[in-house]
Amino acid sequence: MGNIVRATGDSGPSGFGCSSTAEQVTEGEDASRLTVIITGGSSGIGAETARVMALRGAHVIIGARNTEAAESVKQSILLNTPSARIDIIHLELSSQNSVREFSDRFLSMDLPLNILINNAGVMHCPFELSVDDIEMQFATNHMGHFLLTNLLLPKIKSTAEETGIEGRIVNLSSADHLTTYRGGISFEKINDEAAYNAKLAYGQSKLANILHANELARRLREEGANVTANSVDPGLTMTNLGRHLTTFAGMLLKPTNL
Ligand SMILES: NC(=O)c1ccc[n+]([C@@H]2O[C@H](COP(=O)([O-])OP(=O)(O)OC[C@H]3O[C@@H](n4cnc5c(N)ncnc54)[C@H](OP(=O)(O)O)[C@@H]3O)[C@@H](O)[C@H]2O)c1
């Protein structure tokens, strides 16, 4: 089973807790041999992850639908870390064509791939179908990342084999995976507007992130691949994720300087 890592107030066995920063957690680490893909690196948690990965020397590939925003994240990282290695590739996760194009672009760069961070996400948006006719939160948060992971898995496995460095796949989930339609994922009604509840649909997509990581971790272990898959709940962080919210909790999530 993949692990669900939840940020809690207390420090865990690692000595880190929810008040630990990414810089503290990676202090002294040399990531210069690593190539990392971060989806949604143009904002919030993804942008901070990109910054700290680049600070530690990793080659960072940001997958972003808004490449202008990603470019300004890149420029602000370069201001403090002029040696940062960052590339931006367009990625619209709600479009399976775009996910395939992203993967083709990345693979044509002939780089290794040590870490895939499936971070991008949308929360509580009004009902909308993707270009592939899939409800938007499910299409973006789960389906896009599921496809992306499958397309990149051979590269992650071969990199781990060639380098001896454990490959990692990380899905950003949420405590909201507990707030779903009755029975969890409403497979029969995923694209049914009449049954749509924005909050439950978000929870369902986040549950799918965890189930994806769990099953993938099981299969990777079974075949003896030197790659792990995990999901993480990042806790409550002020980002742009609350853009569709009007409640007080939503307001708390809105402001960001990341
Ligand atoms: N913040 C929290 O408290 C919290 C709590 C639990 C879980 N999470 C999870 O953490 C992850 C990161 O969220 P965040 O808080 O950093 O939110 P955020 O600031 O809104 O960042 C989300 C990122 O995902 C990108 N994105 C959204 N839809 C996309 C699509 N269709 N294709 C490609 N990229 C897309 C956004 O791009 P644009 O800028 O173009 O929209 C943005 O870069 C999400 O998976 C979220 O569910 C966050």
Image (spheres, rainbow, N blue to C red):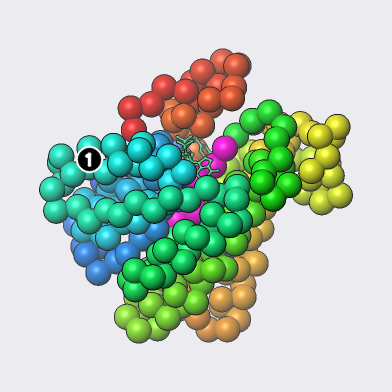
In this rendering, is residue 228 above or below 44?
below
Query: Which residue is disc 1 drawn over?
Result: 75
Horizontally, residue 128 falls left or right of residue 240, namely right
- The image position of residue 211, as x and y in percent, is 66, 58
In this rendering, is residue 154 above or below 207?
below
Please indicate, yes or no, whether residue 7 appears anywhere in the rendered image: no
User: Is residue 120 covered in magenta?
Assistant: yes
User: Is residue 171 covered in magenta?
Assistant: no
Quadrant where the N terminus is found in the figure: bottom right
In this rendering, is residue 10 above or below 151?
above
- The image position of residue 140, as x and y in percent, is 60, 46
Residue at 40% x, 64% y is: 106
The residue stretch that appears in magenta: 117-122
Q: Which of 149 and 221 is in front in this view?
A: 149
Horizontally, residue 188 falls left or right of residue 125, namely right
Label 1: few (<14), some (14–19) or many (≥20) C-alpha neighbours in 10 Å: some
